[in-house]
Amino acid sequence: MMSMPPSRRASARFALAIAVLGLLAAQPALARKSDRQQEMQVAAKNFDGFQKPNSVSTLTGNVVITQGTLKATGAQAKVYFDADTQISRVVITGNPAHLEQLDDNGNLMLGDAATLDYDNLKGIAVLSGNASVTQKGRGEARGDRLTYNTETSQMTGESAGDGLVHMTFKPKPQAAATPAPASSSSTPQEQP
């Protein structure tokens, strides 16, 4: 087996990256647009904080946060309020922290990581620490840090050191071929 020179390997990686971007662009799956217009529901065993401008509240123990079809869970959450006392950001930690959401076509996205940092104003979720994102019917990505745009379903990923971002792309399901009908012109076999 021949080894490629470093410049050729870099070109091959660049070509692969362009092909991966093309695959992602060819399969759009937008997150449910109405989710960010829904109320955000928050539940936990313990709560410490208040809803004041530019404040932070802490939730601990079985944290569950929902907003439309978007659901996030973890062991602890820090909820950040902006100057208008609107939730601007939620940082969830857990073993793992978990995120899920349906897109407008009813496809489910699942994400897990040690830390999930969700920007409620931009709809961006950053999963870091053994992160994984699976988009049902489309594939999955794993890395040290994955960024998921809940509005466009665009993902980016990176891994530290010698680690790699791993991706799996599923082919689009094809319609099943219908079996040919049995022929009615067959002749009966004579029995001896």
Image (tube, rainbow, N blue to C red):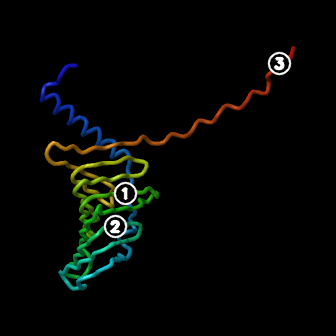
173 shown above or below 106: above
- The disc label shown at residue 189, or none: 3
Kind of residue indicated by mark 1: Leu
Residue at the disc numbered 1: 110
Kind of residue indicated by mark 2: Ala
Residue at the disc numbered 2: 72
Report how far apart the C-alphas of labels 2 and 3 lie in the structure.
Answer: 67 Å
Residue 151 image-quadrant placement: bottom left
Could you tell which of marks 1 and 2 lies nearer the N-terminus? 2
Q: Nearer the viewer, residue 148 or 73?
A: 73
> Which residue is farthest top?
192
In the rendered image, residue 104, in percent from the top left (x then y), is placed at 43, 60
Residue 45 image-quadrant placement: bottom left
- The disc label shown at residue 47, or none: none
Classed neighbour count for the residue bearing mark 3: other residues with Cα under 10 Å, few (<14), some (14–19), many (≥20): few
- Asked whether the residues under the numbered discs 2 and 3 touch, taking CB atoms below 8 Å apart as contact, a structural biologist would say no
Query: In the structure shown, which secondary structural element does the residue marked by tag 2 occupy?
Result: strand
In the rendered image, residue 155, in percent from the top left (x then y), is placed at 28, 52
Q: Is residue 162 left or right of residue 25?
A: left
Say which residue appears at 24% left-offset and 75% top-offset: 79
Location of the C terminus (image quadrant): top right
Q: Is residue 5 left or right of residue 115?
A: left
Query: In the structure shown, which secondary structural element does the residue marked by tag 1 occupy?
Result: strand
Say which residue appears at 21% left-offset and 35% top-offset: 13
Say which residue appears at 42% left-offset and 51% top-offset: 136
12 shown above or below 127: above
- Asked whether the residues under the numbered discs 1 and 2 touch, taking CB atoms below 8 Å apart as contact, a structural biologist would say no
Could you tell which of marks 3 and 1 lies nearer the N-terminus? 1
In the rendered image, residue 12, in percent from the top left (x then y), is placed at 21, 31
